[in-house]
Amino acid sequence: MRLRIEAEKQLGNFHFNINADITDNRIGIFGESGSGKSTLVHMLSGHMHPDRGEIFLDSDCLFSSSRNLNLRPRHRRVGLVFQQAALFPHLSVSRNLFYGYRRCNKEHRKVTPDELIAVLKLDGLLERGVRNLSGGEKQRVALARAVLASPRMLLMDEPLSALDDGLRFQIIPYLKSVTEQFGIPCIFISHSVVEMQLMSNRILTLQSGRLNEETTPDQLARKTMARSQRGYVNLLELDGATSEGGLFAYRWGEGRLLISDGNSRSSALFELSSRDIILFQKHPEAISARNLLECRVKETFSADNRVGIVLTSGNRQLVAEIVRKAADEMQITAGSTVFAAIKASSFRRLI
């Protein structure tokens, strides 16, 4: 998918002005509240038109002030999933799902309802009223309703922000599997760096109604490391767990990781803060942390008064974080060997 947008809009004292040309099927829009994320969503969907500019999706013009062209929302075939599920309360789950499907021209229908219902595990919910659904179930139904309309592009405007962490990370695998399995380009809007890491390949960061930069999830996590409460969040997909002394042992790089919050399923996703990794120049004689990894320093990077240390073991990578003075005292540079200590309780299982 190629998205080109050059648009301006004055909303009271807020001036929105963006010029971007990005090619990817998984685009993230990142920014704090009031940065213009929702304004951009409404412009792309056709529910708000710019004062001037142009919007192109692939080779099709959705809006052009110079051509006096503004496609209506239904003609843009852009699916929407918002913070709140916004389901029709008087309709069953089944009737909610098929609302968009029946309004989609037959020649545009590319998603098979039964297949989508199976992917999102909605089989047992079809006859329920939407008032009898949990928050996570409502978001899955809202996602299915948007996808069944066979959109050319799916806009997700902070669809997880109203959910607690448990539900949030249950929903993310469904979001990823649906967009990947049915080949639907996705624009994911959020102010969460972790959600950007999980849901996007390329990111546009907005600030005060303007494009601040185009970046990658890793670069965004590095840049925000120092001011984030959790530092750089390492995301680890692990499998092959075995039980060992009340802990779960996972293969990782040239060694293994012992984790207290593990499980015996085939795979799991964990987060680990860069601030929970303690570095040593030499092998310590004895420590209470259950994980001690011999790692090579791939590179270092600066974030305010902090230094990020990119560690490698085999084909695996972690980012640790220390203050600049500690990095200078330890003489850590690319190619150095260090020992990384991590408590088994420092890993947080997401999925």
Image (spheres, grey):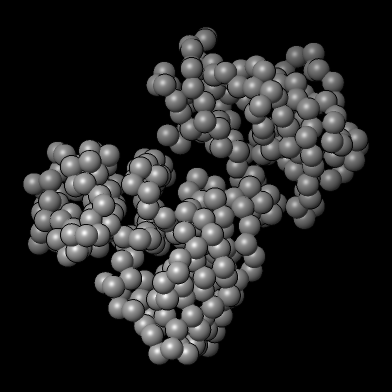
- Residue 4 appears in the figure: yes
Could you tell me which residue is drawn at 40 percent across and 44 percent down? Answer: 180
Q: Is residue 349 left or right of residue 149?
A: right
- Name the residue located 45 percent from the left edge and 66 percent from the top edge: 58
Side (left or right) of 303 relative to 106: right
- Examine the image and state in which quarter residue 103 appears: bottom left
At x 19%, y 47%, the residue is 113
Question: Quick one: which residue is furthest to the top in this view?
Answer: 245
Q: Residue at x 48, y 17 (%)?
A: 240
Q: Is residue 211 above or below residue 66?
A: above
Instruction: Tell whether 312 sits left or right of 228.
Output: right
Residue 7 in the image: x percent, y percent?
A: 51, 80
User: 176 or 91: nearer the eye?
Assistant: 176
- The count of marks equals 0
181, 121: nearer the viewer: 181
x, y percentage for residue 312? Answer: 72, 29
Is residue 278 visible in the rendered image? The answer is no
Quick check: 31 above or below 296?
A: below
Q: Quadrant of the C terminus?
A: top left
Instruction: Name the foreground residue: 143 vs 272.
Output: 143
Quadrant of residue 6 in the image? bottom right
In the rendered image, residue 218, in percent from the top left (x then y), is placed at 63, 47
Q: Position of residue 342 (x, y in %)?
A: 66, 26
